[in-house]
Image (spheres, rainbow, N blue to C red):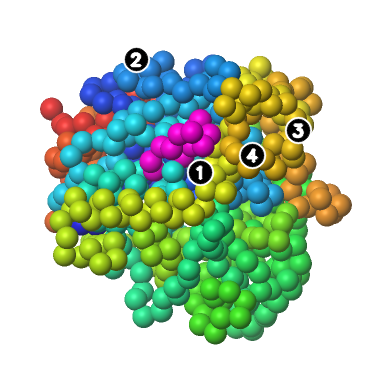
Amino acid sequence: MALSIASSYFWRGNEGYWSTFNVLVGTGPDAQQFEVLPATSFSATLLILSGNPSGCPSGDVPEDCPELRGGLIDLAAAQANGWNTQTSSEGEPYFSAPFFAEDTNGLPTYENVTGEVGYDYLALNWAGGSAPPGPLKDQVIMATSDLSPWVGLLGISATPSHVHGGGTSEASILSTMASSGSIPGLNWAYTAGAYHRAETVGSLTLGGYDRNRFEEDSILTVAFSRPDITRDLGVTVKEITISVDGSLKPVAASLPTLTLIDSTVPEIWLPQATCDQFEAILGLTWDQGAQMYLVNDTLRESLQARALEITFFLSSNETASSEFNVTFPYAAFDALVQAPLAGITDDSTLNYFPLKPSPEEQGFLGRTFLQEVYVMADYDRSEFKVGQAKFPGHPVAQDLVTVHSPGNEGLGEGAIAGIAVGAFAAVAILTAGLLYWFCWRPRKQRKERDRREPETIRSGSLDDITIVGDATEMAEMDAPVEYFTKPLAPDDNFSNKSELDASATAQAASGRQSNRAELSAGSVHRPGHRHQSSWASGSSGISPMGEDRIQSVLGQPSPPMYPGGSPSPPPGDRWHHSSSSPRGLFEMAE
């Protein structure tokens, strides 16, 4: 049957407020808990590292950084509790995460996400009356001290990991659950949630979808972009219109264009010419230093007062007649940026418009887009569906629909699981020529985490043969190869970087002149509406959702987190912050 992962009811992010989900790493009383964001183009789990180096370096980030990043993993404690550390063929414990959809399409920060990798137990927090027995075993987990992505990620792609190149294959979370019979097929459904719509939290379902979270009368079905499985969720943006004061203004430059729906990316990335039209219509100004569209108070108030609506028209390809359109209110683009982005070093915020020019021909429709859109991906049928999201408010009642593998609706769970995994294995064989893209690349330990030098290949190994060459030569080889980059040089301090490296984005490539937005005296805001966890030790669970209670890792109902059983903090306590020990969301009350 379909299983829904419970929202944490907390919002994290330094480039917007995003609805998070809870995971537990390890087993027993020493298991560690984190808040993460679903990543549609990623199949492992990425967490933020504590210790040295730390994902919250002293003096460089706000004091409450550990909480803002969803919690930090104590790797020494994890290793003492069963974490199986992985090393490269040369004994190095550092790898580059395979964000290939982003990396190969010009988003350079994801190319440099480096950390330690291990296998460990991973437990998800289930909503409703049923849950799989126990945590998932031997899941690929990376611990990184990098400052981007800011919040940890839960990979929901069915694509396997290849930590040690083509010689090994580690099942994704989705495949692990299908093979165990916990879900009847290789599919998921997700919407990011919308803070601007009464804080309607995100929804993530495995093995089916939630009928209460999307409009069923208008659905676009698109085939996966095979054999290139880095672009499974590819969709064409055919047209965009902006309604300002009731006047409709078309945005047609460089459209139609291929985009990838990808929740790993926070913003919407479109061609430079398309962004230029947004600038002209809305009065946006690109900030070269921050590498984003910062919005001062005067412009923000003007946009809020002009009944602004932005409509995207999507299709499966440029010539397809069937279309799907979704309309965004300005509130969906009224985002906040926080430290360490945009030169911010304290807990203040700046307003920004989450649109960026794509450095390559392909664009991205990130979490900003998924606020108003519900996506259902089906790896058994190699297709996905896109619909208009619904916002049922609180508490969120569910109407889960199970999606079986084709032809297996009447079979038992074990048979369905075997066929589902076998079908996906066949697809994996067909795409073996692209396997090298999905190898975790070992990286040497950073002597200085915040300093980089241009990447060169040092060495690699394949069947005991040593290979030396540059990145281009090794990329052209047919077989997957492990490789390293050289130690990092003191030439690029991270504090000068935005979410995506300013030196490598489209704006720098296009030679745009620096044109810093003028910010009025009131443009720097204190985060008065930032949703922070209380981390209260006296109430450790999540509240009921309707008649269903959220299940702990043991399949037992958890106690309410707040007095009265409400799913959110009571008024007045909503933004309370405490630096006490992490809450035990999966623990039962004594």
Residue 294 lies left or right of residue 157; in this view the side is right
526 is higher (above) or lower (below) than 223: above
Task: Give the Cα separation between the discs numbered 1 and 3.
Answer: 36 Å
Q: Which quadrant of the view contains residue 458?
A: top right
Residue at point 60%, 63% (across, down):
259
Answer yes or no: is residue 215 visible: yes
Q: Which mark is residue 13?
A: 1
Disc 4 marks a residue whose amino acid type is Glu
Numbered disc in front, either 2 or 1: 2
Q: Label 4 belongs to which residue?
A: 111
Element at badge 3? loop
Element at badge 1? loop
Disc 3 marks a residue whose amino acid type is Asp
Which residues, given as a range, are shown in magenta? 161-172
Element at badge 4? helix
Q: Label 2 belongs to which residue?
A: 80
Residue 265 lies left or right of residue 588; in this view the side is right
Q: Earlier in the sequence, mark 2 or mark 4?
A: 2
Q: Earlier in the sequence, mark 2 or mark 3?
A: 2
**Residue in the foreground of this view, choosing between 404 and 581:** 404
Residue 305 highlighted magenta (yes or no): no
Residue at point 21%, 31% (across, down):
587
10 Å crowding of disc 1: few (<14), some (14-19), many (20+): many
433 is higher (above) or lower (below) than 410: above
Q: Where residue 2 appears, x then y in whole percent?
A: 24, 57
Q: Where residue 533 appears, x then y in whole percent?
A: 37, 37
Disc 2 marks a residue whose amino acid type is Ala
Q: Where residue 153 appears, x then y in whole percent?
A: 46, 41
Residue at point 74%, 73% (across, down):
253
Q: Earlier in the sequence, mark 3 or mark 4?
A: 4
**Image marks 2 and 4: residues in contact by CB distance under 8 Å:** no
Q: Label 3 belongs to which residue?
A: 470
